[in-house]
Image (cartoon, rainbow, N blue to C red):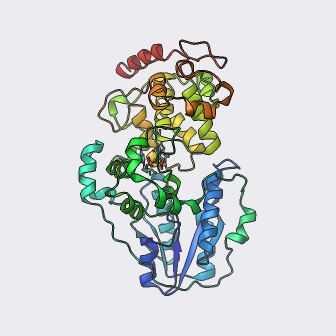
Amino acid sequence: MRAVYLFKRDLRLEDNKGLAYASRRHKEILPLFIFDKEILKDLRAEDERLSYVVRALEELSKRIRVYCLYDTTEEALRKVFSVYKPTHLYTTKSYSWTGKERNLRIKNLCKDYGVEYVEIFENFLVKPEDVPTRRVFTPFYGEWIKGVILEEEKVDGFSVPYVPLPTIEEIRQKLPLKGFSSFDPLDCKKRLESFPFERYEELRNFPAIDGSSKLSPCIRFGILSVREIFKRAKDRSEQFIRELAWREFWYHIAFNFPQTKDLEFQEKRRGIEWENREDYIRSFFEGITGYPIVDAGIRQLKKEKWLHNRMRMILASFLTKVLLVDWRIGEAFFKEHLLDYDEVVNVGNWQWSASVGADPKPFRLFNPILQAKRYDPDCEYIKRYLPEISHLPCSILTDPLNHQLPYHKPIVNYYERISKAKGLYMFK
Ligand SMILES: Cc1cc2nc3c(=O)[nH]c(=O)nc-3n(C[C@H](O)[C@H](O)[C@H](O)COP(=O)(O)OP(=O)(O)OC[C@H]3O[C@@H](n4cnc5c(N)ncnc54)[C@H](O)[C@@H]3O)c2cc1C
């Protein structure tokens, strides 16, 4: 019996249910990661996600030999199957739209080659299908928290065969690797151990403060197990646990309402006539809307490939409800830039911010003037990302409509646009 273990969003050896399961059944396992050319072709040449994954695999490779192929998933697997002739292939179950589709292709290929395909549940605290269908977060949370499973599964010792396939050192040169992420998977553990969960609720809303965990890339790529994170936070911050639940809520929604990948969750909000003005979209993407808090957010996103949650909400709300741009355009923009990009979570949150998604509140407002005053009271955040106007008093920076800033003129008047948005939403 020869097994392949295909790593995906679980780039770790500790508390890895998929690998643990395979290791209980096989003495020899070929660990594999595929840099799928089809997926990589859509990324920018300098995409930091690639360097982040490479770094994670280099770390893994210090402990076990991981074979890494750079090809389409099908071609890579054909190569592995012909070289190693496995009897089984193990990998984690996927709940994202593209992940499910990829797993199906892998399963079909295994069938063609007579390889037994095994999917293991991992990366979530509760199976999305185990929570009774809920359309609203709070009742979801009540059910979800009851189902959390924290049992750890130890990976048994196994040997790795020597086969003529490349490892990360050999493949590194071939990858279109240009960008380097400011996030390092090696920091995940340290961050988890030192993060003051007790202060999370108090600090998490202020983008200038290092008050949120910044664990999103560690979760996205499975550098840490969600169980380990949950255990650390439990009894220290219920609010933090709720955030972990938000992630799973969006998977629950995607599982029960798969059409929401492209369609608004709220049927009544389908078919809104978005303006989609190119000049507005360009100003937003370039961070020159004339609203300092918005432009600072765009700068952070492009520079650091990560954005504070409050800023994500302000940006998404501004693009959709103030500039009247289709949420799908914003979703694609975040997809291009976010290191922690997760299609299910991103789509869910964009729809939520645009008030077209799973949210009982009919029309959520994030007034950039009030948001800046409340959550960036000393303009520390604005000044950090817009140093060219950092000499100005904060009262001016937060209120561009009532002051002439030596800066880009506001492209629209927030208040006029919001009343237009309300009209569009109500009478589409
Ligand atoms: C428009 C928009 C798009 C987003 N796109 C993504 C995305 O592509 N990938 C992504 O991981 N998160 C996304 N989020 C959710 C959230 O902003 C990030 O998870 C969070 O900012 C990451 O920082 P953190 O790790 O410091 O979060 P913390 O505040 O420390 O939270 C801990 C963890 O909980 C989860 N979490 C927190 N908030 C949310 C939320 N609103 N929805 C789902 N999970 C959450 C994340 O896994 C996060 O790492 C988006 C939010 C908005 C408003």
Please say if 158 is above or below 289.
below
Query: Where is residue 39 drawn, in percent x and y?
Result: 60, 54
Q: Is residue 318 above or below residue 177?
A: above
Residue 179, horizontal then vertical, whole percent: 70, 51
For the residue pair 88 and 61, the one nearer the viewer reads as 61
Q: Quadrant of residue 304?
A: top right
Q: Residue furthest right?
A: 173
> Which residue appears at 46% of the width and 29% of the height?
317
Position of residue 409 in the picture relative to residue 344 (left or right): right
Between 214 and 97, the residue placed more toward the observer is 214
In the rendered view, does 377 fall on the left or right side of 151?
A: right
Q: Identify which residue is drawn at 43% across, 15% down.
A: 420
Q: Is residue 59 above or below residue 333?
A: below
Numbered label tally: 0
Q: Residue 284's x, y, as percent?
A: 59, 28
Query: Is 320 drawn above or below residue 350 in the view shown?
Result: above
Q: In the picture, which quadrant includes the C terminus?
A: top left
Q: Position of residue 45 (x, y in %)?
A: 71, 49
In the image, what residue occupies the spot 69% across and 80% down?
Answer: 164
